[in-house]
Image (cartoon, rainbow, N blue to C red):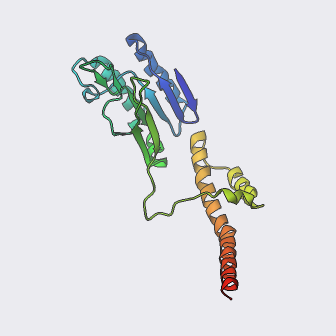
Amino acid sequence: MMSRIGGLQGFMGHTKMQKKASFLNELREVRSHCTSLWVLGGDFSMIYSTEDKNNENLNRAMMGRFRRFVNDVELKEIPLIGRRYTWSNEREAPTLVKLDRVLCTSNWEDTFPDCILQSQASQISDHCPLLLGLREGNRGKRRFHFESFWTKFPDFHETVAQSWEQPVSASCPMEQIAMKLKRLTKALQSWSQKQVGHVKTQLGLAREILHRLEIA
């Protein structure tokens, strides 16, 4: 079962052995139509390394199929932080397997270099949820902060529209959004320095005048 948003692909793989090969072929077909950014994540229901399971009960033929698929379509795995396995059969001597993972193209990694994959706790599933996000920016780098009162300025919406409506040189919807958001961030930073910075200066002067009146 699959769902797709732009270059982001989510799915749940087949548990029956005879359907796993056709599932990989289906992913190959999807990959052939995605020429730009692509990231896919979910329950693959298969592994490609002996390190992905805590016992020797392995289907090495299927492991080889999965490994060839990853290599053939030129995907890279986003490392999972905080957990080695993502599924357990929850028995007294449990079988632990890394069935869930996120794979991406190299240009996805280049576009989102601060991408990070973390595990989450769950009490309702034998799979642990995975959270794909971004690392916090470097301490020395200026971070972008959006203020809700900006929307009260008459030229705020015009500034956003002018930035967003400009075309970008990308065909993949996911990459288009990333490029537009980056450009909009710069536009709002420049706008706030001119508009909001001026307002803050006026407020500072007003406070100083009130202070002098109070002590006069």
The percent coordinates of residue 73 (x first, y second) are 43, 31
The percent coordinates of residue 84 (x first, y second) are 30, 33
Q: Is residue 67 among what the camera can see? A: yes
The residue drawn where x is 68% and y is 89% is 216
Residue ranking furthest to the front = 215
Q: Is residue 172 among what the camera can see? A: no
The percent coordinates of residue 22 (x first, y second) are 45, 16
128 sits left or right of 216 in the view: left
The residue drawn where x is 45% and y is 28% is 42
Picture layout, residue 117 above or below residue 191: above
Quadrant in which residue 105 is drawn: top left
The percent coordinates of residue 38 (x first, y second) are 50, 36
Picture layout, residue 212 above or below residue 200: below
Picture layout, residue 132 above or below residue 1: below
Q: Nearer the viewer, residue 191 or 119?
A: 119
Residue ranking furthest to the bottom = 216
Residue ranking furthest to the right = 154
The residue drawn where x is 41% and y is 35% is 120
Q: Nearer the viewer, residue 102 or 36?
A: 102
Quadrant in which residue 79 is drawn: top left
The residue drawn where x is 40% and y is 12% is 16
Q: Nearer the viewer, residue 125 or 29?
A: 125
How many numbered circles are shown? 0
